[in-house]
Every structure is written in structure tokens, then in C-alpha cells.
Image (cartoon, rainbow, N blue to C red):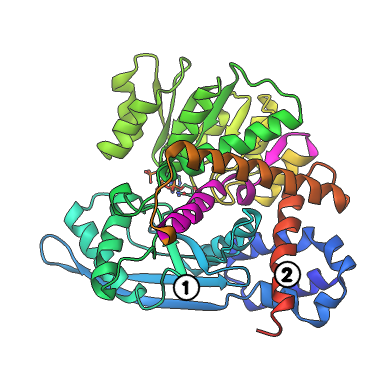
Amino acid sequence: MSYSQRVYEELKNKSASETEFLQAAEEILLTIDPVLEKHPEFEKLGLLERFIEPERIVIFRVPWSDDSGQVHVNRGYRVQFNSAIGPYKGGLRFHPSVNLSILKFLGLEQVLKNALTTLAIGGAKGGSDFESKGRSDSEVMRFCQSFMTELSRHIGADLDIPAGDIGVGPREIGYLYGQYKRLRNEFTGALTGKGVPFGGSLGRVEATGYGLLFFMEAVFKQNSINVDGMNVVISGSGNVSMYANDMATKMGMKVVAMSDSDGYIYDPKGINFSTIQEIKEVKRLRISEYTKYSPSAEYYCGCKGIWNVKCDIALPCATQNEIDLCAAKKLISNGVIAVGEGANMPSTTEAINEFLTQGVFFAPGKAANAGGVATSALEMSQNSMRLFWTKEEVLKRLKEIMTGIHKSAKESAIEYGYGYNLVAGANIAGFLKVAEAMKAQGLV
Ligand code: NDP
């Protein structure tokens, strides 16, 4: 049994119920074998065992009261996974499905993603099983204040810098930051994704969606694909999906379908970014409203059906495991040529293998959606220097970073015998950087 297989078997015994975490760990461990062969010293140093164990996990009670005075209690988490190359950094997710397995998988992915950006940031993730849908602004504010009252003891501008994720957008970051500032009595960059008037970076809100398209542009260029007029399907209609739509349209593609957790819309004329922005970001309504704005649009119940829509390019941007083997086969039989993951781990292991064996160009989330965290790191730099870059400057840097990630994933894959396999390449490039730092820092 190889070193990585042994570590994975041990992890399965220890964390049997953490299915998402095991899924993410298996994919990483099983692709880095060629690296471990080249570095036999890693086994003696217990490097893999340390790499897959979070440095620290904080779990806490979050009590808050609703508008009628009824008290509710949610569970809050922060998984500080790895600080070998920089302070912990990663988003907060507020969604009823949040549990330790999901946050550990997200944290582990974040470690490699952050390493790939070439910026000095370690990996973390956190959040709560809180559901903001249907809650008033003042309820969301009270929840955020209670959550931050505990979290503030564990974060800081040089220690751990959370950001947004599912259910945590500019509104929530504003409330969280306000409470952090009040508790700590300091104005420091301890959160990113802040509003521009109080230290946020221009371009951050667009960064993950735009970054995904910049990454895909590098994939298309590498493989001489002309995307003009091609049909794109994007799942979700949140932060990542919305700005993926914007940039895909600006690059000459046509976004024909988008979704939320209730259903999806199909519009053969192309889905308008500003309309989606008004419905989802400004009015906080359901995507079904879109049919009121566009007569050519149709709404279908059930979000999974979106993968039956014929397209050339699929961009899953909603949540984990949204594309299973069946959806992957449907996309392939409908002629998909490229899949770019805006969400974290939106494709199951079986779906990824199907894409790779059938010759679909596949961009894994930890590489393709790194634009958000990369721009968060640019926000940290601007906060430290007490200055602001223009949006053009930020987007220029974002594009360079995304092109650089594609290059390093491609080159690592080729160097270790995987050909143009960006899954293996991203895992190898990210792991090597973190492993070398851990090795140099001794047994910690
Ligand atoms: P948002 O909360 O802004 O949007 C999430 C979207 O996905 C919504 O349309 C939501 O629908 C839908 N969705 C959420 N959960 C489910 C589910 N279980 N089933 C079906 N649809 C679902 O989140 P983001 O856009 O920020 O994040 C989306 C993905 O991108 C996540 O995987 C996140 O980890 C990843 N990501 C985000 C980054 C960022 O900068 N924001 C950075 C890197 C990755 P509904 O409104 O009905 O809930």
C-alpha cells in the first residue's frame, strides 16, 4: 500500500461520517503519489498526516432573537486548517446544510487554492447552519453580531481573515465587520469582502465569477477554442454565478440557463446580467421572477434539471456535488466541450472521471475559482498600505493571477506525467508549496 493510500485508509477510519471531507481528501491524496515518490522524506516527517489534520477547530453556540423576541440557537464554526504559508484565510458560509464535514472539505480545498494564488495566505473556512432566507435585515444583523462576538476572539488581520461564501455577502460582511470593530476597538483588515467605503477592494464582488472566466480563457487559448457565440449554462444565481454570467457575456458567449435552489430558467436569447442582479442582489427574490422580465424565458421547477440543457460550456457555480455521474453523462451527450467549476467541489468524483476520460476540458474549483480569495488578498494588501487601487488595476492583477494558476497547474501536471490534467496539476502545485513550507518549519 502506498503512503497516500495508507493515510487515506486511516482517515476513513477516523472520519467515517465526514463524507464530503473524505471525498476532497481522497481526490488530493490519490493524485499526489508521483510527488511522494520523488520526496520519500515526506513519509518520515508525517507530512500527509499533518496536512490533512486541521491545526485548530473552534465550535461555538450562536444565540440570537428574532423580531418577535423568540430566541434561536445556531452552531458556529471556524476551521483553521493550515498556516504554513500565511495567516488563515477563507470564507464563512451561512446555510442550513453547514456541518463539520463540509467546512473541513472547504478548508482543505482552501489550503491548496490559496497556495496556487502564489500569495502568502494559509487556509481556513467557517460558518454556521443559519438560514438567512426569509429573515429580516435586523434578524440577520443580530445573528451576525452574536456570531462575531465569539469569532472575534479567534481572528485578526495577521491571524485569520474570513470573507464571504454561500449566504454571506456584502450585507453580512458589513454587520460582521461592524461588530468586530466595536468589540476590538480597532479598524484593521480582519475581514475581506468589505464595502468599498470601509476598506473593501474595488473588483472584489466580481472577482470569483470574473476570475473563473479568466481561467477558462486560458483553457480555451491553450486548446485553440473559439468561444464566440457558444452557449453557456451556469448553475446558481448568487455572487459567483452572476458575475460569471457578466464576464461570459462580455467575452462573446451566450448564457442560456441559470438556477437557484428551487429551479432554473432557460432563455434562448441569453440571460441578462443586470436583470438577474436586480432580482437576486437588490430585491432578494427567486429566479423564477426572471420570466416577468423576459418573454422568451421559461422557468422549470427543480434545480438539477439545469444539466439537461444543451450547452457548449457548463459552469457549476452553486454548491458541492451538484453534478453527479448522470448529469455529467447528459452534459457530454449534449456536446459539452468544457466544464469550469466556480463552486467548490460541484462535481462528484465519478463525474470528474467521466469528464476527463471523455476528453472534456475540465477546470477544477480550487484553481478556477481562486479569483475571489486572490482579490481578498489584494484587499488585505491595500488595507495594510492604507491605499486603494483602481478597479482596472485590481482586475489586471486578478487576470495575471488566474493565468498564472492555469500555467502552474498545467506545468505541474505535465512534469508529473499527467498530461493536460488540471485536477492533478492543481493538487500537485498547491501541495508542493505547502509541503515544502511545512518541512522547513519543523514538527509543528
Ligand atoms: P451565494 O450565496 O451568493 O449564491 C449561492 C447560489 O447557489 C444561490 O443561487 C443559491 O440558491 C444556490 N445554492 C446554494 N446552495 C444550494 C443547494 N444546496 N442546492 C442548489 N442551489 C444552491 O454564494 P456564492 O456565489 O458566494 O458561492 C457559490 C459557490 O462558489 C460555493 O460553492 C462557494 O463555496 C463558491 N465560492 C465562492 C466564492 C466567493 O467569493 N463568493 C469564492 C470561491 C468559491 P438559493 O438562493 O436558492 O439558496
Q: CA distance from mark 1 to mark 2?
A: 20 Å
Instruction: Identify the image quadrant of residue 252.
Output: top right
> Amino acid type of disc 1?
Leu
- Residue 353 location in percent, x, y? 74, 45
**In this orientation, which residue lies closer to the viewer: 341 or 192?**
192
**In this image, 353 relative to 234: left or right?**
right
- Residue 78 location in percent, x, y? 45, 71
- Residue at position x 39%, y 63% from top? 189
**In this image, 186 relative to 231: left or right?**
left
Q: Which residues are magenta?
A: 357-383
Q: Is residue 239 visible?
A: yes
- Residue 170 location in percent, x, y? 32, 50
**In this orientation, which residue lies closer to the viewer: 160 or 209?**
160
Q: Residues within 10 Å of mark 1 (few under 14, many from 20)?
A: some
- Residue 386 location in percent, x, y? 38, 57
The reply to whether dot 1 and dot 2 touch (C-beta < 8 Å) is no
Q: Tell me the quadrant of the picture where the C terminus can be found.
A: bottom right
- Residue at position x 22%, y 53% from top? 135
- Residue at position x 47%, y 57% from top? 381
- Residue at position x 62%, y 52% from top? 366
Q: Which residue position is annotated with label 2?
A: 435
**In this image, 154 relative to 144: left or right?**
right
Instruction: Identify the image quadrant of residue 152.
Output: bottom left
Q: Is mark 1 within 8 Å of ligand 1?
A: no
**Tag 1 secondary structure:** loop
User: Is 224 above or below relative to 192?
Assistant: above
Q: Is residue 330 visible?
A: no
User: Is 122 above or below relative to 397?
Assistant: below
Q: Which residue position is annotated with label 1?
A: 159
**In this orientation, which residue lies closer to the viewer: 379 or 42?**
379
User: Is 416 above or below relative to 363?
Assistant: below
